[in-house]
Image (cartoon, rainbow, N blue to C red):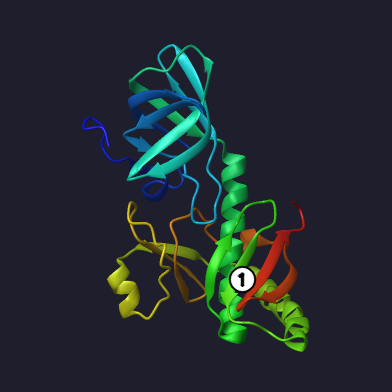
């Protein structure tokens, strides 16, 4: 890390409701993929944890810069994109995410956690991987199911998800430590990021480590439906989508 660049404050965690914030551009770097801006703090969620990056605009004196992807590397969020007007420079600026993609990604991520919860309630299986992108979202669980069980679980899952959505229960998050998660006997992924705070998300009492963005209540997930359940190589994959997608 360059000695003049500090780790990025992850404002999307501390201020999740703020789509636009004041920032300082610490560095401007040009490379083969485009221009990268490094900020002191950011509202942009960097791609990772099975969730896509936020997109949006950084605007400073004499320039507007389109962010097409944010990435977290060694505690620094790098905002990759290209100028819309002028050329970016260091100094004070405003960073703004596009709300529609953030909302879509948050719904998909929260839906994955609701599925984790329902599957654990119904089968005792724990999630080991999540992919919450719009192009084929899924959650993978440790263990396999035979054909009769798979045939029945789709209907049971959908019924339980419908109940959870109708209950409009809060989806909450809190900061914690890997040690505390282990003390609570909560599954901790081996790839838990070391360059961001450890956080746990709770849905209907089910607690899971997660650094992504989420909707505040289960009722916002109306239209969630299970596409299929497939078992292979020791894991069971549940794919899902929204009816309005």
The residue shown at (45%, 41%) is 71
Q: Which of 52 and 174 is in front in this view?
A: 52
Q: Name the residue under label 1.
A: 115
Q: Where is residue 233 in the image (x, y as percent from the top left)?
A: 63, 76
Up-down: is 114 above or below 61? below
Q: Which of 138 and 33 is in front in this view?
A: 33
Q: Is 46 placed left or right of 180 in the picture?
A: right
Q: What element carries label 1?
A: helix
Label 1: how many residues lie within 10 Å, few (<14), some (14-19) or many (20+)? Answer: many
Q: Where is residue 45 in the image (x, y as percent from the top left)?
A: 47, 45
The residue shown at (41%, 28%) is 37
Q: Is 214 placed left or right of 107 in the picture?
A: left
Up-down: is 131 above or below 140? above
Q: Is 24 placed left or right of 160 in the picture?
A: left
The residue shown at (40%, 14%) is 61
Q: Which residue lies furthest to the left in this view?
A: 3
The image quarter containing residue 181 is: bottom left
Up-down: is 143 above or below 178? below
The image quarter containing residue 138 is: bottom right
Q: Position of residue 129 (x, y in %)?
A: 54, 66
Q: Where is residue 103 in the image (x, y as percent from the top left)?
A: 59, 47
The image quarter containing residue 18 is: top left
Q: In which quarter of the image is the N terminus?
A: top left
């Amino acid at each position: 890390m360059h000695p003049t660049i500090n780790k990025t404050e992850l404002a999307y965690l501390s201020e999740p409701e703020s789509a636009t914030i004041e920032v300082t551009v610490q560095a401007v770097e040009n490379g083969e993929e485009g221009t990268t801006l490094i900020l002191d703090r950011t509202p942009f969620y960097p791609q990772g944890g099975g969730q896509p990056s936020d997109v949006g605009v950084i605007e400073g004196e004499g320039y507007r810069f389109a962010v097409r992807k944010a990435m977290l590397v060694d505690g620094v969020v790098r905002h990759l994109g290209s100028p819309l007007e002028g050329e970016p420079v260091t100094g004070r600026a405003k960073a703004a995410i596009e709300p529609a993609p953030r909302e879509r990604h948050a719904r998909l991520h929260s839906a994955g956690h609701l599925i984790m919860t329902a599957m654990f309630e119904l089968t005792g299986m724990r999630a080991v991987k999540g992919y919450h992108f719009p192009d084929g979202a899924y959650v993978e669980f440790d263990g396999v199911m035979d054909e009769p069980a798979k045939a029945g679980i789709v209907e049971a899952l959908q019924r339980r998800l419908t109940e959870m959505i109708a209950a409009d229960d809060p989806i909450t998050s809190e900061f914690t430590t890997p040690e505390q998660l282990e003390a609570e006997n909560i599954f901790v992924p081996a790839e838990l990021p070391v360059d961001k705070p450890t956080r746990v998300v709770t849905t209907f009492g089910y607690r899971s480590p997660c650094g992504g963005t989420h909707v505040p209540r289960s009722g916002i997930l109306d239209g969630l439906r299970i596409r299929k359940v497939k078992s292979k190589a020791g894991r069971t994959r549940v794919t899902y989508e929204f009816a309005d997608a």
